Image (spheres, coloured by chain):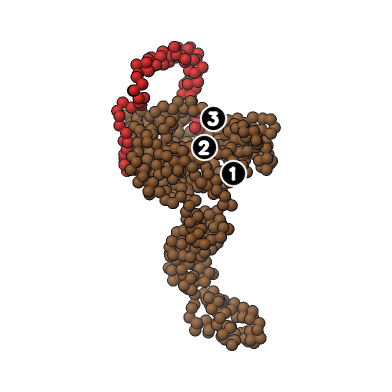
Chain colours: A brown, B red
Amino acid sequence: MAKPDLMDFDRALELYEPVLGFEVHVELNTATKMFSDAPNYFGGEPNTNITPVDLGLPGSLPVVNEQAIRYSISLGLALGCSIAESSRFARKNYFYPDLAKNYQISQYDEPIAYRGSVDVELEDGRSFTIPIERAHMEEDAGKLTHVGGSTGRIQGAEYSLVDYNRAGVPLVEIVTDIIYGADRDAPELAKAYVSTIRDIVVALGISDARMERGNLRCDANISLSPRGSGILGTRTETKNVNSLRSVERAIRYEIQRQAAILSAGGTITQETRHWHEDTGRTSAGRPKSDADDYRYFPEPDLLPVQPSTELIEELRAALPEAPALRRRRLKAEWGFTDLEFRDVVNSGLLNELAETVAAGASPQAARKWWTGEIARLANAAGVDSSSLVTAQQVAELIELVEAGTLTDRLARQVLEGVIAGEGSPAQVVDTRGLAVVSDDTALLAAIDEALAAQPDVLAKIRDGKVQAAGAVIGAVMKAMRGQADAARVRELVLERAK
Amino acid sequence: MSEITAEQVAHLAHLARIELSPEEIESLTKELGSIVDNVAKVTEVATPNVPATSHPIPLVNIFRPDVVGETLTQEQALRGAPEHAEGRFKVSAILGEEQ
């Protein structure tokens, strides 16, 4: 198909109401797989982190990972879901070599968690409640590499190579109910929802939640309803959205694409669509199968899961604070303005700040460093801020500044040293000899030298031209190689003029 | 009587990626029909107080601890594969889209 026409986003929203639904897959970070004791790790040599169960070899039997059950229940509770008194696994039958068994073990009619909701906050602070239909457990599939095609995709490929290291990795799939009323916030809401799910699983410590690594994957369902008609449109399911930004862009794109087709009198095909990060478009995938085609039936190799009330209450008591509540609490504790706080949240630095404050730094100083110099360096290097320095190191740096050992300028040099792996801030101060010269005798000697070189300065200051001190301060800072507190130097210069 | 149709058999054959001739579809339609009829007889003898079950032994919560065990080597894993390359199973690429 040629490049599809897109309708202007605002025009599309005038004509249609977007109706959303999301399926988010979360890979659990258990030690072993869902149904086998192979390591839950899929880097490394292909087909080495597998057991006969993961290959579906004859005579092998799956056994449920207890930790995966606990994690799934915790996640269900964090999503405000009820935990099923009895849930069971089912076979989802399909013929594709990403699983060797020709079926995926999933849950169908009796998921472990059902009916919940998640409060999601938009960037401007408005809150939106996303209804959750269910969260169910299943196993991840292996990884296929298509060989021989020019694009590395299946079209034109001569054959495919399969690595089953990822097969059997525990997943929880979170399915929302139909989401109405998102309106023009739909793209941002989609991003905020996935971001909130990520915050929840990170807070629970049950997933690494790295979207770029596929630990967290979002399938976005969207349809358009002619405004005021109350009629649901045909939906598409967009896959391959691997970043928060893509989630937002993909929804926006689908709204514009579907609106263009519908307004021209066309119809939407119910299908899977693939998001392409590079072109910012979606392309048609396979027609969506009916659930009937998967011929679900109860997994005869596994027994029902019936968690005790004690277990559920134990896990409920251990739940971390909900991300939305935590944000509200931290904002109040730190005394940040709306703008300051939003800046931190939108930069994804909330956890870093919280840890830095917990390590003893003042909230404002922590904010200044994380959203300022550290974010700048991270941007320049194209990496996450949190991969550059630890909260502990930042707190130590701030402490050195507040104790007067470092000026901001020196602290930036120390930060560079810490990032370069030269040790803790205190060690970098020592090895690079960066501490502020706080010895007034040394400062006065430098000041007198500078004053001797610029004899007219003292007279000017005495005439009330205090700004004339700047030239001397500059000369002293230079002589001290920046390792002086400019404010202190200024005080001393003014004293000299008295 | 069973409601298995030739279209359903052809559809199932497609889902299972099995190529069937028209003659095979015709005979399988009859065979599957009689299998379904026979299974349906079981429901006639089941009383309402027999709950549906998918497992012969009434057990629940059979779990294993989250402890890593022994894995196959790559050589062992690939031993039964008709074809392999680069440490991976080699399969035909004409199998359609990912599920």
> Foreground residue, A471 or A147?
A471
Query: On the picture, is A19 further left or further right than A82?
Result: right
The chain under label 3 reads A
Q: Position of residue A330 (x, y in %)?
A: 48, 57
> Would residue A177 be seen by someone viewing this image from the given angle?
yes
Numbered-mark total: 3
Label 2 marks which chain's residue? A
On the image, numbered disc 1 is attached to which residue? A187
User: Sequence order check: which comes first, mark 3 or mark 2?
Assistant: 2
Amino acid at pointer 3: Lys
Residue A351: assigned label: none
Looking at the image, tell me whether mark 1 or mark 2 is earlier in sequence order: 2
Residue type, label 2: Asp
Give the image quarter of residue A250. Answer: top right
Disc 3 from disc 2: Cα separation: 18 Å
Q: Which of the pair A209/A180 is nearer the observer?
A: A180
Residue at left 35%, top 39%?
Answer: A307
Q: Which residue is mark 2?
A: A177
Q: Earlier in the sequence, mark 3 or mark 1?
A: 1
Towards the viewer: A225 or A383: A225
Between the residue at mark 1 and the residue at mark 2, the CA separation in whole angstroms equals 17 Å
Secondary structure of the residue carrying tag 1 is helix
What residue is rendered at 58% in x and 79% in y? A473
